[in-house]
Image (tube, grey):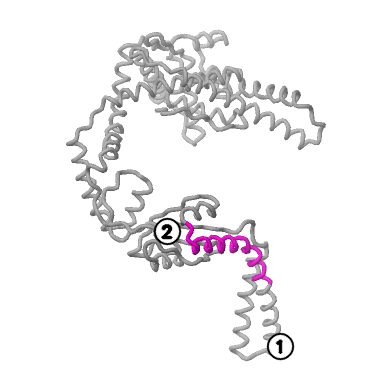
Amino acid sequence: MRPDKIERTPPMKSLKITLALLLTLALAFSALACGNKGKTDPKATFAPFESDEAYEAARAALAFTLGEYSVTAGEIEDSYYDYVNMMQYYGMPAPATDEEIADIVNSSMDQFLIQYYLLYLADEWGIELSDEELAEVAAAAEEERLAYVEGYTEDVRASYEDSGAAMPDEASLLAEAMERLESDAMYYIGTSFDEFIENYGDSMRVDLRIGKVQERIEGEIEVSDEDLQAYYDTLLAQQMTGYAENASMYKYDVTTAANPVLWTPEGYARVSIITIAPEGGLPEDYETNAATLADLEAEYGRLMLTNEDPARQAEIRTEYAELKASRDLAYAEYSAGARTRADEAFAELKDGADFDVTMGKYNAYEDADVRLVYLTETDADFVTELWDAIGALELGQFSEIIEVNEVFYIVQLTEKLESKATPFADATEELRAAVLGDRLENFWAEAQTNWLVQARAIAIIYEEAIAYIGKVS
């Protein structure tokens, strides 16, 4: 886990869901200390323990110390069973041999060793959190606490509403919600709710310090101008060849920003689009009536071809006309508001309004809707009516109102892109980020191996303390 900023966990209605979060955090160097409640009970299948007291004593024994940090066998065991239970949840068998058990135990140990080695480095380098960062963590933890309290309170309220029982006052609802919260926290996580929130904040503080260590390490990675030029030359050649074979890859690269885009192929333009859709929905029988109209057309055609049953033909004409008129009226009523707004937008543009201003005024979901369009060949991202309209526009022109699938559009051709290469000097920062990203991907894999070697050299590890973990009869 490399936290670059504080991210709050989305509000959850149940601490059952939180268990999945804790499993993930535990496997990604989390600092949350989780209990073993609701999981496979290792004591039940490990013969040497003669009592609960003996088992708890084994869990409390130190697995390792690293500087001022220490981890107990119980923490390693919890991480082990988190992983085993996750394996079983996804249909994989639990480890059955000593070798399989040892692999997972050692992996759990390694995760803790790397985490605390980075904290050890933070101490060595004097890396601490600022008062502002500490305040942000405290605020995030409080927000998380309130989200749980609110969620559980609403669950309690809903249970009274569903049962028809008399609704208690707010203080009583809150008290019952807190009782449920404490019960769930102890059952699913093995701590009190307050301890869970405290651990949540601790985890964020640890992750932020580790992130600062990683940022410092990353800052020591150098990228020379020669490296950038070589990357530029290679990427430009690849894009010139690739876009010539498949021009749609240019749009993909621009929108995904996976790499700096250094070459612009022929045929691309940018368009701005005003989109106005009706609100609400069509009547439930609208599509059914469409099918009925199609059936009537087919029947009428057969009768006309065979010159049969003039009376039925007359009935069909009457029924068809009435049904079509009803359907057209339903659509007109459904689309009237959108049609009016589209007419208003078009009138504003005809009067000289700025297209961007009008677009921001009428687009409901995205004020600015500017898209790349490929004009040389049919662009699959645009329906035919829109693509045809765009192709007929001159630079700066806007279209008439285009109605497609119950939605109204007005499009403007805002820019025709020149086919050219982006100069090296204009792409230096993007190139540096890309080269650094490539190097970091390999660097972190190697770094974790090195950190583990260094952590094991510094740590005092008590192998005998973790020997019991995962051993089943």
Residue that lies at the very extreme toward the right in this rendered image:
166
Q: Is residue 6 left or right of residue 13?
A: left
> Disc 1 marks which amino acid?
Ala
Residue 472, visible in the rendered structure: no
Q: Which residue is mark 1?
A: 311
Q: Secondary structure at mark 2?
A: loop
| Residue count near mark 1 (Cα–Cα under 10 Å), binned few <14, some 14–19, many ≥20 | few
Look at the numbered disc 1 and give the secondary structure of its residue. helix
The residue positioned 48% from the left and 22% from the top of the image is 204
320 up-or-down from 220: above or below: below
The residue range painted magenta reads: 326-353
Magenta includes 330?
Answer: yes
Image depth: mark 2 or mark 1 in front = 2
Q: CA distance from mark 2 to mark 1?
A: 49 Å
Residue 104's image quarter?
A: top left
Q: Which residue is mark 2?
A: 381
